Image: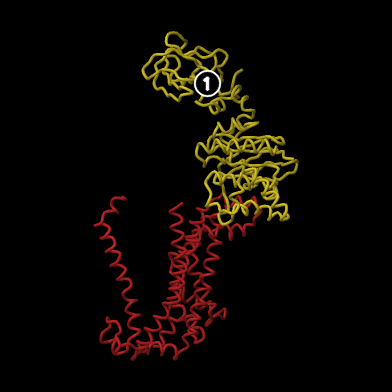
Amino acid sequence: MGSLKIEQVKKSFGHVDVLKGIDLAVEDGEFVVFVGPSGCGKSTLLRVIAGLEDATSGRVTIDSDDVSATPPAKRGIAMVFQTYALYPHLTVRDNMALGLKQAGEQAAEIDKRIGAASSMLGLEPYLKRRPAELSGGQRQRVAIGRAVVREPKLFLFDEPLSNLDAALRVNTRLEIAQLHRRLKATMIYVTHDQVEAMTLADKIVVLNAGRIEQVGAPMELYNQPANMFVAGFIGSPKMNFIDGGRLGESVKTVGVRPEHISVDPVKGDWKGTVVHAEHLGADTNLYLDCEKTGLITVRLFGEYAAEAGMTLHATPQPGKTYRFDGDGHAVR
Amino acid sequence: MSKATASPARSIAAHGILILYTVIALFPVLIVVVNSFKSRTAIFRQPLMPPTVSTFDLVGYETVLKQGDFLHYFQNSLIVTVVSLFLVLLFGAMAAFSLSEYRFRGNSLMGLYLALGIMIPIRLATVAILQLMVASGLVNTLTSLILVYTAQGLPLAIFILSEFMKGVSDDLKNAGRIDGLSEYTIFFRLVLPLVRPAMATVAVFTMIPIWNDLWFPLILAPSESTKTVTLGAQLFLGQFVTNWNAILAALSLAILPVLILYIAFSRQLIRGITSGAVK
C-alpha cells in the first residue's frame, strides 16, 4: 500500500556530494521524520523520493516498483511544501482538483474526494476563495488538502510548519498527527525542529552531512543515542559533553542530559558558580561553571530560586550518563 | 528616512525637480502636437504659441490622410511592432525559463552569450544583415524587419526575464510537476503570470525603439508597400521644401498607437509594483 525502500542513494551537485549513500526502509503506514541540521541533505533526500531530483546513483522503490526513472506525477506521491506552493490563480477548490483532473479522474469522483478532504480539514467555507485571500494556516491546510485528495501511497512533507507562527504550528502539528491516525497512510516528514520530530514520528531518521546517523523510535534515540551527534541533536537544552579525563573516566567524552542533573546548595559532585539562570516557569535552566567539568547546563523542573553568582553543587543522576569513545560512538 | 520624505521642503524640492524634468522631456512632444494643428505661417511665426482661431488649421492632417498611403504605413508599423514584440516576449521568456530553471552544462556561458547583444549595437552588422536579406530574398518584406527587431530585442528580454524567473518559487513549479503538469503548462500557466510585471517592462523597452526606428526600414524595406510610419513621414521632407504641417501631423498621429500600447503595459507594470509592495 505504501512502503518505501531506498538503496545506496547518492546525489552530487557538481563536486559537492550532498547524499553519500543512503539506505532506508519505510513500512506501510509509518510516520517517518527526517531530521538534521540545515544542509544535511534531508530535503534533497525527500526530493529524490518525490522524483524532483534524480539520484546520481542508487535505487528508490515504492511498493516494490522501482521508480528511479518515473516522473513525480506517476509515483503515487503527494507533497506539502514549506511555502505552501498553492497556484495563485486558482481557487481553493481548483487547487485541490488540478492534480486529479490531470490524472483524468471523473468529475463525480473529484467532487467526492474534495468534499471529504475539505470537511476533514475544515476548508468548506473557503472553497471558492483564492490563496491570496487566506491566512497562512489556512493556506497550509489547503496544501495538505491538495495532498489528501490525491490518495497517494506516500505523503511527503517538506518543513510544512516552518512558515507558521508558534501557536499555529502546535495546532497544525496536532492536525497532521490526527490526519495520520485517520488515513493510516505512510508519511515522510522533513524538519529541522526536533520537537516536531519527537512528537510526530513513529521512526526518526537523523541525518548529518549526507549520511544517516541513526534510525529509531523517538525514545530509542533519546535513551540510546548511537553517537555524540544524535545525543547532542535530540533533547533540549542540548546534552552536556564533558571531557572524560577531567572526571577520571577511561572514555574520551561523558555526556549528561541537563534534565538528569540535580543541584544542591551544600553538597554534590561538582561545585560550580551560576553564570546565568533562565526562569521559564515550568522549568528553570541554569548555566553552571564547575571546576571539574567546565560550563554545563542544568534543567530543573518547576521554579528554583537561583541567580548569577550563587554557588551550587551539581550531581548527575546515577545510570543516566552516556559514554562516548574517541570517534564519538557510544560505549555501552 | 521616512522623516526625510515627510519634510515639506524636501517634498517640494523633489516634486519641483521631477516636474521640471517632465516639462523638459515633454516639451518637444508638446511642440510637435501643438504645431501640427496650426497653419504653415503660424508654425514659423509663433512656434511656441498654441493655435488660435485664426491660426488653427488641419491642413497637415488632410495632406497626411490624402497624400501618401498613411493608413497603410500605420498598418505596416503596427504589424512589425506587434509581431516582433510577441516573438521577443515569447522566445525571450522561454530562453529565460530554461536558463533559470534547468541545470545543464554551459548554462551560465549560454546566458552570457545570449545577453552579449545588449553591449553590441545591432546596427554595426547592417551591411551583413542586408547581404543576408538579399541572399534570402527577404528585402522589401515586413518579415525582414520582424526578424531583425526580434534579434535586437531578445538579449535584453532574456537578461531581465531570467533574473525575474529565478525569483519564482521552486516549490510552486515542483507542486505543478507532482500534480502532473507538463513543463509547458508550468511555464505558461504558473511562471508567466508571476513575471507579468517584468514582461511589461521588457515590452515597453522593446516596443518603443522598434516603432521609432528609421534605419532598418530605410535599408531593408523602403518599398511603397512595406514603408513604416517613420519612413513614410520622410516623404514630406524635401531637399528644398519641407511640408512641416504634414510631418508634424504624421508624427502626432504616430504617437497614438504606441501611447495606447504603453498605457496597456504600464498598467500591468504599476499593478506588479504595488502588489509586490503590499505582500
User: What residue appears at the point 40 percent right and 85 percent down from the top-left corner?
Assistant: B234
The chain that hosts pointer 1 is: A
On the image, numbered disc 1 is attached to which residue? A257
- The residue furthest front is A125
Q: Is residue B177 visible?
A: yes
Residue B186: quadrant of the picture: bottom right
Q: Is residue A307 left or right of residue A50?
A: left
A57 vs B244, nearest the viewer? B244
User: What residue appears at the point 51 percent right and 83 percent down from the top-left corner?
Assistant: B226
Measured along the vertical axis of the image, is residue B261 above or below residue B247?
above
Measured along the vertical axis of the image, is residue B261 above or below residue A56?
below
A271 vs A128, nearest the viewer? A128
Measured along the vertical axis of the image, is residue B4 above or below residue B200?
above
A178 vs B236, nearest the viewer? A178
Q: Residues within 10 Å of mark 1 (few under 14, many from 20)?
A: many
Colour that chain A carries in the picture:
yellow
Instruction: Give the SS element for disc 1.
Output: loop
The total number of labels drawn is: 1
Residue A24: quadrant of the picture: top right
Q: Is residue A182 left or right of residue B132?
A: right
The image quadrant where one finds the C terminus of chain A is top right
Q: Position of residue A76 (x, y in %)?
A: 70, 46
Q: Position of residue B193 (x, y in %)?
A: 54, 60
- The residue furthest top is A267
Measured along the vertical axis of the image, is residue A90 above or below residue A305?
below
B95 vs A140, nearest the viewer? A140
Q: Position of residue B17 (x, y in %)?
A: 27, 64
Q: Position of residue B152 (x, y in %)?
A: 48, 69
Q: Amino acid at mark 1?
A: Arg
The image quadrant where one finds the N terminus of chain A is top right
The structure's colour scheme is by chain
Colour that chain B carries in the picture:
red
